[in-house]
Amino acid sequence: MEETLTTLFATWPFGIFFLVAGLCIGSFLNVCICRLPAGKSIVWPPSQCVSCQTPIAWYDNIPVVSYLVLGGRCRRCGATFSARYMIVELVTGLLWFGYWLAYFKLGIRSGADHPGVYLVHVALVSALLASGVIDYDRKEIYTAITNFAVGAGVVGSFIWPAVQQIGMYDQIRWLPDITGLERVDAAVLSLVGASVGVGVISATRFLGALAFRREAMGVGDAYLMAAIGACLGWEATILVFMVAPFIGLPFGFWQLWRERKQTQAEAGEEAEEPPPPKVGYASFVTTVLGFALFLAAALEARPAWGLAARGLVLAGLVAFGISFLLLRREEGAGAEEPSEEESPAKEETPEQAGHEIPYGPFLGMAACVVMLVQNYAVDWFRPGLQALFSEWLGRAV
């Protein structure tokens, strides 16, 4: 059945279908981008003009085409629509078609020419695109989007274990025998990937707060990395975390240049030193414990998975679950309303808000790149990692 479906997916009619489907998904992403920050339903009411509130007819809601035909204006009142609506639709369609082309025609990534792998990956790409646009605009990441991506990763891995198989370090075509059931093993590995994604963000937040006396990364980035880890596996999650800073570097330099161009009046104002962020020791300790348990499970599983190794994996997942709950508690504590005795904080101007660098879009871009180059990256670092691991293991033994 899967072989037949894979053969159908590789035909050009399916490629055109995924291009059109991507354009339609892009139209839905525009709804999410506009309505989620406003606290509105993404299902009802149907699309309507924000100026005259007139429902948009189906023939005026055809992705990309309707925008070009109407010149980016409402048919009834003539109000102008942002060109970003068309751009999001077009980018989504091109991404869906581009990954189909890369996986099924060009064979860029070994094992990715699989229906389940493709569907989970484009679901993640769509979620990352919507989340990245919102994060860039509002410096916020919405769990409605990241929870969908985590669910797509876990459920998709259960239905199609190949989703996790292609992310294995040694590119083998079988999964670790954690539970004895292949589909469940794949779902567990998806949860491990999500846990590692949360863990690297939690550790970075803790170390950044200690070293720089400021928040290094937001809790929303932990949700985003959990989604990436659930869909791509823990190894890809580490690569994403390593690649993202290089993608964000040009933007960071541009932001620094903007700050230097501030007016003399702003430069002359004496800015108050912001209070240092609260350091979450509890979440950091449980994160380190989770990593230690996963490492112990990997060592215990050599040469075969036993009861002890399986118990360590379960304990590691529990530790990361506790770490994530503590991280959310810290986020809630940091968002408490100031008392009446405290002076209200000044609202940020758009210029001041623009100086904050949202990291979510760069994590999303890095994930899109890693989907294509993970095999090559692993092959590049494999000899050194194997030699280092073998030498370390030999000394430990």
Image (tube, rainbow, N blue to C red):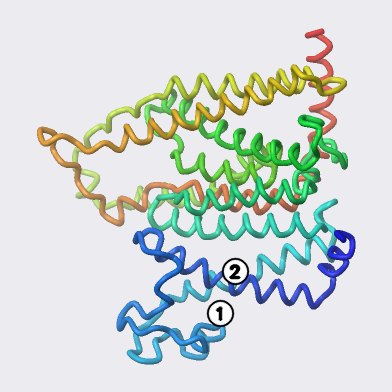
How would you rate the neighbour count of disc 2 (Cα within 10 Å): few for under 14, some for 14-19, many for 20 or more?
Answer: some
How would you rate the neighbour count of disc 1 (Cα within 10 Å): few for under 14, some for 14-19, many for 20 or more?
Answer: many
Residue at 33% x, 52% y is 261
Tell me the mark number nearer the camera, choosing from 1 and 2.
Answer: 1
Tell me: 307 left or right of 48. right
Q: Circle 2 sits in a helix, a strand or a loop, which is it?
A: helix
Nearer the N terminus, badge 1 or badge 2? 1
As drawn, the label of residue 312 is none
Tell me: 194 left or right of 1. left
Q: Please name the amino acid that badge 1 sits on.
A: Pro
The spot of residue 311 in percent (x, y) is: 70, 21
Tell me: 143 left or right of 338. right
Which residue bears the numbered disc 1?
63
The spot of residue 364 in percent (x, y) is: 58, 51
The spot of residue 139 in percent (x, y) is: 40, 50
Q: Quadrant of residue 307?
A: top right
Which residue bears the numbered disc 2?
91
Q: Circle 1 sits in a helix, a strand or a loop, which is it?
A: loop
Q: Please name the amino acid that badge 2 sits on.
A: Val
Residue at 35% x, 48% y is 260
Which of the two residues, 267 or 212, is positioned nearer the viewer here?
A: 212
Which of the two residues, 44 or 204, is positioned nearer the viewer here?
A: 44
Marker count (numbered) = 2
The spot of residue 199 in percent (x, y) is: 56, 31
